[in-house]
Amino acid sequence: MIPLFGPVPGGMEMMVILLIAVLLFGANKIPKLARSTGEAMGEFKKGRQEIEEELQEAQSEVDPTTDTDTVSETDRARDTDTDTSEV
């Protein structure tokens, strides 16, 4: 499997990243930053799920196997022409 964003950092690299984060934000702001990041991820997942549900509903409305009202008059005429020619 090929990672999308390159190699995942290991133990030493994570320590360096954590040290830089502590230096940039301060030790007391990191839990707040992590909490707000988690809340943002939750909102993103909820929004993505709502969009997926809307797309599924729209797709089921357009699907001709579930709804016969979407068939146009020309399609109905063509179907009846082929039915009468077979008899």
Image (cartoon, grey):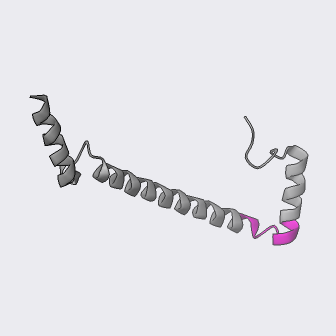
Q: What stretch is highlighted in magenta?
A: 22-31
The single residue placed furthest to the front in the displayed view is 85
Query: Which percent across, then down, holds residue 67?
Result: 22, 48
Query: Which percent across, then down, holds residue 60?
Result: 31, 49
Foreground residue among 40 and 79:
79
Helix, strand or loop for the magenta stretch, by majority: helix
Query: Which percent across, then down, holds residue 80?
Result: 13, 41
Query: Which percent across, then down, holds residue 50?
Result: 43, 58
Give the residue displayed 30% in from the left and 47% down from the top.
63
Give the residue displayed 75% in from the left and 65% down from the top.
30
Residue 30 shown in magenta? yes
Residue 79 shown in magenta? no
Q: In this view, does 44 lie to the left or right of 69?
A: right
Give the residue displayed 88% in from the left and 52% down from the top.
15
Q: In this view, does 40 lie to the left or right of 67?
A: right
Foreground residue among 37 and 2:
2
Q: In this view, does 39 lie above or below 56?
A: below
Q: How many labels does the image show?
A: 0
To which quarter of the image does residue 44 belong? bottom right
